[in-house]
């Protein structure tokens, strides 16, 4: 499997002329999965379970790839159920309900 991965990676590096792809290894995908699961669930114990770690300190190493706090967002508002469904289908995530404006606030990464 690793030989095939290395071969495909070399082909992509050559085709896309992007030597930065050399930094991606099979183990990188484990870090990516852990980072995304932690971001989605905010539950480090769940990520620890998925990775099969006994120590939480080991899991912390895997949840660092992206600083989600610095992301930029598209923000949208929904005034009714139809608008909410449209936003959810477009992969927006619910943030909160504004009682002042009587709208549900959604966001999606740019």
Image (cartoon, rainbow, N blue to C red):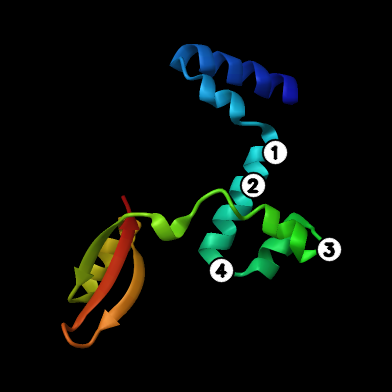
Q: Residue 70's x, y, as percent?
A: 40, 56
Q: Residue 13's x, y, as percent?
A: 53, 17
> In 3D space, how far apart are the residues under numbered discs 1 and 3 (Cα atoms)?
19 Å
Q: Give me the disc on residue 42.
A: 4
Ranked by sequence position, the earlier of labels 4 and 1 is 1
Vertical comparison of 24 with 100: above or below:
above
Residue marked by disc 1: 27
Q: Residue 22's x, y, as percent?
A: 60, 23
Ranked by sequence position, the earlier of labels 4 and 3 is 4
Q: Residue 85's x, y, as percent?
A: 28, 66
Residue marked by disc 2: 31
Q: Residues within 10 Å of mark 1 (few under 14, many from 20)?
A: few
Q: Are marks 1 and 2 in contact (CB under 8 Å)?
A: yes
Of all residues, the one furthest to the bottom in this rendering is: 99
Give the residue drawn at x 74%, y 55%: 51
Ranked by sequence position, the earlier of labels 1 and 3 is 1
Vertical comparison of 7 with 46: above or below:
above
Q: Is residue 18 left or right of residue 87?
A: right
Q: Is residue 34 left or right of residue 84?
A: right
């Amino acid at each position: 499997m690793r030989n095939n991965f290395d071969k495909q990676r070399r082909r992509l590096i050559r085709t896309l002329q992007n030597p930065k792809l050399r930094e991606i290894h099979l183990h990188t995908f484990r870090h990516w999965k852990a980072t995304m699961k932690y971001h989605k669930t905010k539950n480090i114990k769940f990520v620890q379970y998925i990775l099969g770690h006994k120590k939480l300190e080991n899991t912390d190493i895997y949840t660092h790839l992206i600083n989600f706090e610095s992301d930029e967002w598209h923000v949208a508002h929904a005034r009714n159920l139809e608008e909410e469904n449209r936003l959810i289908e477009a992969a927006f995530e619910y943030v909160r309900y504004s009682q002042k404006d009587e709208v549900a606030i959604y966001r999606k990464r740019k």
